[in-house]
Image (cartoon, rainbow, N blue to C red):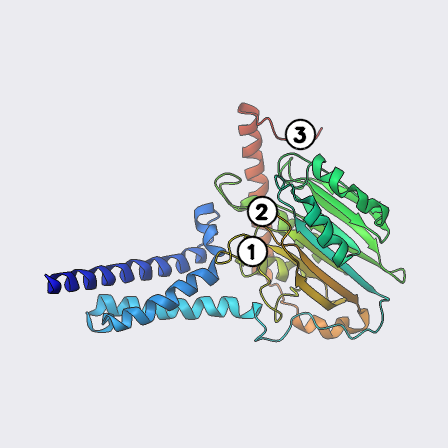
Amino acid sequence: MHTLLSVSFAQLAVGLVAVLGVAGIVATLLPLLRHTAWWIRVFDFPRLQIVGIMSLVLPVALVLGFWNRGWDSRGVVIALAAAIVYQLVRILPYTPFVRKQVGDSTAAGHRGHVSLLMMNVLQYNKRADLAMKVIQEADPDIILAVETDTWWLDQLRPLQHTHHYFCHEPLDNTYGLLFFSRLPLHDCRIKYLLDDDVPSIHTQVELPGGSRMRLYGLHPKPPAPQEAKTSTKRDAELLMVGKEIDRNDEPTVVFGDMNDVAWSHTSELFRRVSGLMDPRVGRGLLPTFHAEHRLMRWPLDHVFVSPHFKVDDMQRLPYVGSDHFPIYIKLSYEPHDKHIQEANVEEADAEDHAEALEKIKDGFEEETEDEREEANHPAPHKKLIT
């Protein structure tokens, strides 16, 4: 009986390792497809978790003798090792083990410095006291709060006493946004780039010293069955902004809850097309989601900057009752070093620009299809623009 139990347990262990190994390999391969279906794109997110599981499975497979069980099992071991290496290569830039893409600030004093705070509050979260406490302690010049409805506007309205410039679009569909600035704003606009219920901020901010930077605040829909069946419009919105930035040569910052991870193909394509840089590269992941599940976290909230800026400080802020942690960055406007930083910019080629235009076209085509569907089955929560 003892022998039979031992054999059964060994067979069970071999089967479990085989299933987990193959699942990890498939989860690694699926994101290589350029298909935008949510069930494919969702595997862009948990690279850390996937590589963690595979790193546990691989030594167990070797201990269980997979290497000696024939070419099928040996192929699983080889594929596992290759998948682990590939995942680590994709994650490596967002660790302190590589050179920083955006340099550290070398400017003394506060002149030319601007601090930004991005916070997804989770619309149904009622811990506004925690949110206000974190904001007041960080004391940023610019605040973007997303998933904000009129209740959240009432809770955060006291910020207007210190941040006299603001531009709000509270909505009850989890895509509202509130924007506060203590620095003067010029031509601040709320735009609906694709979805008629997903706004974004487009403005110029007057920096200390009189220079201006262009700033975009974004929060596109994630590829998830309850939100969007594909990542098409999320990708298109980000790349529309990227193409607009590509046509200008001015200090620029894009920030928000992008509902995408830094290492995804779309995020990297956006960086190449826009000419912006990611301050996370060389500094660390700073995973902002999910705030309540330590083992299921990845970076969803981002700041991208032009070579005019360096970083004085960047950190993930404390828990505010939301499923996201806020993210804070203090930038230093140092245009005299722009030519040095441009060496770190990832260049887009003709194929990148063609792909970006194709993705934007797909986004508008999907929007047209959605409009026809909405006309036949109107959703009561959607805010229509007239």
Mark 3: few, some, or many residues within 10 Å (few <14, many ≥20)?
few
Residue that carries the numbered disc 2 in the rendered image: 234
Residue that carries the numbered disc 1 in the rendered image: 266
Q: Amino acid at mark 1?
A: Thr
Q: Residue furthest top?
A: 376
Relative to 191, residue 58 above or below: below
Asked if the residue at tag 1 contacts the one at tag 3, i.e. Cβ–Cβ closer than 8 Å, the answer is: no
Q: CA distance from mark 3 to mark 2?
A: 19 Å
Which mark lies nearer to you, 3 or 1?
3
Q: Amino acid at mark 2?
A: Arg
Residue 178, given in percent of the width and then of the height, sits at 73, 43
Circle number at residue 384: 3
Q: Nearer the viewer, residue 270 or 280?
A: 280
- Going 56% across and 69% down the picture, which residue do you hit? 93
Relative to 91, residue 127 above or below: above
Query: Residue 32 lies in what quarter of the image?
Result: bottom left
Q: CA distance from mark 1 to mark 2?
A: 9 Å
Label 3 or label 2, whichever comes before in sequence order: 2
Residue 263, given in percent of the width and then of the height, sits at 54, 61
Mark 2: few, some, or many residues within 10 Å (few <14, many ≥20)?
many
Horizontal side of residue 213 vs 300, given as left or right: right
Which quarter of the rendered picture does the N terminus lie within?
bottom left
Q: Is residue 71 visible?
A: yes
Relative to 205, residue 79 above or below: below
Q: Mark 1 falls on what kind of element?
A: helix
Label 3 or label 1, whichever comes before in sequence order: 1
Label 1 or label 2, whichever comes before in sequence order: 2
Q: Mark 2 falls on what kind of element?
A: helix
Q: Amino acid at mark 3?
A: Leu
